[in-house]
Amino acid sequence: MKRFARVIISGITTFLRRGGGLLYALGLARIIVRLRRRVPRVVIYHSCSCVEDAFTLGLQSNVTPEQFDMHLGVYRSLYAPTTTTAIESGQFPDCAVAITLDDGYRSVIEHAVPIMRRHGFVGTVYLTTSAVGNHALLWPNELCWFLSQHRESTLAAIAQCAPGLSSDASAFDAVNYLCANSSHRSILEMLSSLRSKHGIDAEELASDASLYLTWEEVASLREEGFAFGNHTHTHPDCTKLPRDELVAEMMASESILQGHSLGKSSFAYPFGANSPADRRVLGEFGFSSVMVLDEIGNSPIDLRRISRIGSEAKTAALLFADLEIVSPFRSFVRRVLERSVR
């Protein structure tokens, strides 16, 4: 039944994307955006590299600088730039759009920031604190690298951790499969075992990759008006952590961020995964806002659950369709489903 429902929703989503693209081509985009002028759009990005490498290829987390430039051109033509801080205060303009960037990739400062600067945007970067400074890799990036460099042994390790993954699975598939079928601790132990097997020094690999921002770069972006938020310490699926592990994860990341005068700000769930239980734990940390993915929309705005929209659209028409047609549909479906289980 669930599989059938997913197929139906996927079909509707494809139809809506095409319909939204047609509306854009007919010149109706501004009118449709104005219909929801008091609903702020919050968009999410990760990496912004010209070419993906072994650490990101297949993760579906990268937009090229050219693609990002096109996206910002659409935002600039249809929306008014705002920030997550303005949304938190309620002081945002009509047809507002805020840009957020997760994980703290170095490509943000290399490629995304110059494009944002040119279009008149600043954004909020959500940092995974163990990775800042390139002393460690986020586990999805490390898994991606192992699949690229040592695929057979990595698939065997995944099978021991969580049997059932297809042998032709992409890095994106593998990450999602492990999130659904294994604990965060088991994933980290699996990667540790792979390092031992292949004689890999974790810190050396991370240093050579230089995937992420340094604290000096964080400070320079902050001077330009960028805000920074908490994206946990080791990028777990928060719904899979027992309460004590989730508290420890949050205390570790908050301690580091506070040490750099960045604590008690906004929080973004890794993978967007959240549940009532972990939302209650996060409530104890007093975050100014909490970011989720494409869930219940931002009408009305709930600072404990701000919906973000991700799009890898290659054209302006499809980007518009994702933001104004597909995302509201998904939010509507999620609201209906949540009400049905109450």
Image (tube, rainbow, N blue to C red):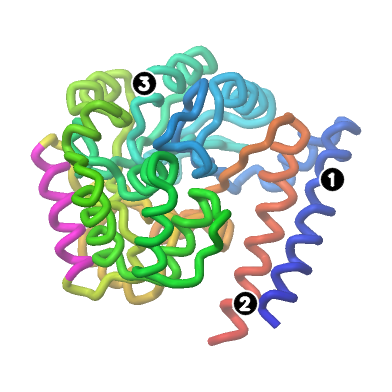
How far apart in space, not on screen, are marks 2 and 1 (Cα)? 25 Å
Identified at 29% across, 37% down, the residue is: 228
Query: Magenta span has 11?
Result: no
Query: Magenta span has 258?
Result: yes
**Residue 137 position within the rendered picture, expressed as x and y whole percent measured from the top left:** 27, 41
Q: Which residue is mark 1?
A: 18
Image quadrant containing the N terminus: bottom right
Q: Secondary structure at mark 2?
A: helix
**Within-10-Å neighbours for mark 2: few <14, some 14–19, many 20+:** few
Nearest the eye: 291 or 173: 173
Nearest the eye: 42 or 10: 10
Query: Which of the numbered marks, if any, corresponds to residue 337?
Result: 2
Q: Is residue 3 left or right of residue 189?
A: right
Q: Where are the magenta residues, as a range?
A: 245-259
For marks 3 and 2, the one nearer the N-term is 3
Give the prevailing secondary structure in the magenta stretch.
helix
